[in-house]
Amino acid sequence: MVDGDVSHDQITRFLSAQEYTSKDLWQQVKPTVRSVKREDGVLIFDDTIQEKAWTDESELMCWHFDHCSSRTVRGINLLNALYYCNGVSIPVAFELVKKPIQYSDIATRKLKRKSDKTKNETMREMIETCIHNTLKFRFVLMDSWFSSEENFDFITGKGRQGNRT
């Protein structure tokens, strides 16, 4: 995408400089999004797990169910939003799935972790942020496991204030 103008080392140094957030990403991509946005844009949500089997467990580096392999894996879980419009795909938001709450599973007596909010809640917050950022889109695409009446009502405007369809 950058025709060799940026090296792998430059990217590594850039990412190591601070802990970046979705807001930082938006500030970087906003001019590009504004130059290509159209009413028929598409907002695409997907999550991915970067498996790290040998890294110590933490609220970020923990066990997640991987729907692709139908098993639980240890790693970093990332929910991301991609804006597609006019033949261009641009990442516009992301959230790292953190599980700060530790509990003991009653059935197995194993120590487990959980998040204080679901990925569905996180996705809805990300959509709300995209709307707040005046991102123009006509459709929201996502994996089928995001499909719920609550999410569809939210997306169509029935489940939130400031209805937008």
Image (tube, rainbow, N blue to C red):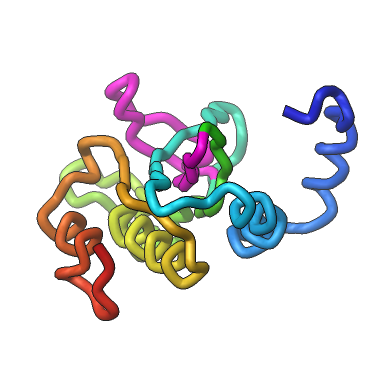
Q: Where is residue 129 in the image (x, y as percent from the top left)?
A: 46, 67
- Extreme residue toward the left, this view: 149
- Residue beneath the point at 35% across and 49% down: 112
Q: Is residue 91 left or right of residue 14?
A: left
Front residue (pair 147, 83): 83
Q: Where is residue 156 in the image (x, y as percent from the top left)?
A: 20, 61
Q: Position of residue 109 (x, y in %)?
A: 26, 46
Which segment is the magenta one?
61-86
Q: Position of residue 15 (x, y in %)?
A: 78, 46
Q: Is residue 81 magenta?
A: yes
Front residue (pair 154, 9): 154
Q: From the viewer's perspective, is residue 11 above or below residue 113?
A: above
Q: From the viewer's perspective, is residue 9 above or below residue 104?
A: above
> In terms of image quadrants, where is residue 11?
top right
Q: Is residue 79 left or right of residue 19?
A: left
> Is residue 58 among the parts visible in the rendering?
no
> In terms of image quadrants, where is residue 46?
top left
- Residue beneath the point at 38% across and 47% down: 40
Q: In which quarter of the image is the C terminus?
A: bottom left
- Residue beneath the point at 20% across and 56% down: 151
- Extreme residue toward the top, this view: 69
Q: In which quarter of the image is the N terminus?
A: top right
Q: From the viewer's perspective, is residue 152 above or below residue 78?
A: below
In terms of secondary structure, what is the magenta stretch mainly?
A: strand
- Extreme residue toward the bottom, this view: 161
> Is residue 53 among the parts visible in the rendering?
yes
Q: Is residue 16 left or right of residue 139?
A: right
In this figure, what is the number of numbered marks?
0
- Residue beneath the point at 30% across and 28% down: 67
Front residue (pair 109, 29): 29
Q: Is residue 12 magenta?
A: no
